[in-house]
Image (cartoon, rainbow, N blue to C red):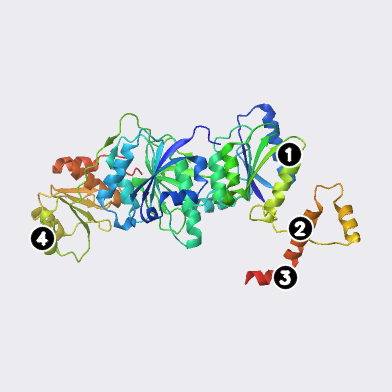
Amino acid sequence: MRIYFTADNQAEERLQKNFSKIIEILTASGVLIMSNLVDRSVSGFSSQDLEKINQSGEVLIERMDALVIEGSRTVPESGYLIAIALTHQKPILYLVEKGKLLNKNLLHLQKDKNTSRLLTLANYNEKSLGSVITEFLENVEKGEGREVPTIKFTLRITSRIERYLQWKTHNTKISKADFLRHKIEDLIDADEAYQKFIKK
Amino acid sequence: MVTNRKKICFLLCGQNATIGPDHWFSQMPEVGILADIEPVVVFDKPSADIIPEVWQNLAAEIFARLKAVDGFVVFHDVDNILYSSSAISFMLTNLTKPVIFTGGHYVSQSDRKLEVKANLINAVQAAGYQYSDVGLMFGNRLLRANQAVRSADESLNLFTASPSAVLGRIDFSIRLADKLITKNKGVTKLVADLNGNIEVLTLAPVINLRTLAKKVIDRDAIIIDASSYLNLPADVLFFLEKITNDLPVVIWSDKIRNQIILPKNLIIVSDITWPAAVTKLMWVLGQTKNISKIRELMAKDVAGEIIKT
């Protein structure tokens, strides 16, 4: 997975430490990172790849899987990046330190049905940063932005199943409902007959 | 996020104008992140039907709003975009704000919307910077419009230009070439007189000079595409010297340089694109009919149109 990460490179030292932490978490998740904060060399692209991209007329954001912005201090080009990422249907994680207000324009975008599924706005602190990023990356991996479950489905279960779900999800960050949804997603992906059927 | 919001005038020029600006921007909330947009419909038919009067209207609309906005985006179908953008570059002398032409290629219906939207967002962003060129934004490049030609390759970079006319490139932001962009100061003038009473020809062995003689009687100039010729044919040369000796004749060719004796009414232009040559001649004829003055102005670099290799 390729992520472009941007933040204000003129920000104070305290925020710079947060930026480093974000890069650390992303790197530990196995993500290839491009960022305005690090060396301009392009992670994961050969010079031939870059030349091909340049000649084709594409912009590099098209080759990214998602965009992460640390917006505690205004990033000069962030508006443009958000606009172009949304155009190319790239999920965006916009992080702001806890206690700071989120930008009004972004809150407005979150209300738009076309853009809300791609834009995640999150306040974070030192403790929550890891889980916020991890959850975002998981959603990116699912593809097509974030699929929000909206269909109500009542399922009566046996006490045996209930014990298992309790045991499985206890002390994890996953709810029983999310656990079951993930299991069903796995079944869908593994069902060859169904995959053939939907591709028709 | 943008704190000092830019104000961009968005001029619709072409078939897309029939959709209407309100519909446009309701489909593209992303554009609202970048700037406050003021939409203006200039021409609502296919751009293949554009005539010089439309360029004059477009120039007047831009001129009227120069103080009120930070930049301009002209949304134009691909047909005639090189003529329109070149014409604007001549009519707005000492331009002090960017005017960015963009549109879409319409390769396939499914890709069209995405390509058009991406070009539009890039154009709005580019129109918010401080420079004073008429540019063309397609794919990942911003080009000086009056030096651009259509690309031979099928790519999102619909147009190409010499390296000195690539005003900006896009990776994760728009990187303007500081040494190549123009930064005019002072007062912009609207010099919008265009004389479209010209005969436009492509040199070929089948030119009927008798028919041509009748056609040019009431013309104010001739412009000839002789780009594939090293030498002018003798009968054409005779015709131009004897039949049209008081008519300015512009020969567009980068190969016909060393013809020993040329008639006085012949003007060779080379380091300029064909659309720029045609629109420049119309603009020059709007200022003067004196052949010496026409020759001088056609040789002069008026709006960055002369290609420097």
Q: CA distance from mark 4 to mark 3?
A: 75 Å
Residue annotated with mark 3: A192
Task: Give the alpha-carbon distance from disc 3 to disc 1, as whole Å.
Answer: 37 Å
Q: Of circles 4 and 3, which is in front?
A: 3
Label 1: how many residues lie within 10 Å, few (<14), some (14-19) or many (20+)? some
Quarter-wise, where is residue A18 in the image? top right
Residue type marked 4: Lys
Q: Position of residue B118 (x, y in %)?
A: 49, 50
Chain under callout 2: A
* Chain for disc number 3: A
Q: Mark 4 and mark 3, same subunit?
A: no
Residue B89 appears anywhere in the view: no
Q: Chain of mark 1?
A: A
Q: Locate the C terminus of chain A and report the quarter of the image it occupies.
A: bottom right
Which of the labelled discs sits on residue A181, or is there none? 2
Secondary structure of residue under mark 1: helix
* Earlier residue among tags 3 and 1: 1
* Horizontal side of residue A15 vs A155, given as left or right: left
**For the residues bearing labels 3 and 1, Cβ distance under 8 angstroms:** no
User: What's the CA distance linking mark 2 and mark 1?
Assistant: 24 Å
**Along the line of sight, which residue is nearer the eye, A109 or A94?**
A109
> Residue A88: where, in percent of width, then height?
56, 52
Q: Secondary structure at mark 3?
A: helix
The mark lying in front, picked from 4 and 1, is 1
Q: Name the residue beneath numbered marker 4.
A: B214
**Which of the 4 quarters of the picture holds residue B180?**
top left
Q: Residue A102 at x, y = what percent?
A: 63, 36
Q: Which residue is mark 1?
A: A129
Q: Amino acid at mark 2?
A: Arg
Q: Tell me if residue A90 can be seen.
A: yes
Question: Are dots 4 and 1 on a single chain?
Answer: no
- Secondary structure under the numbered disc 4 in the rendered image: helix
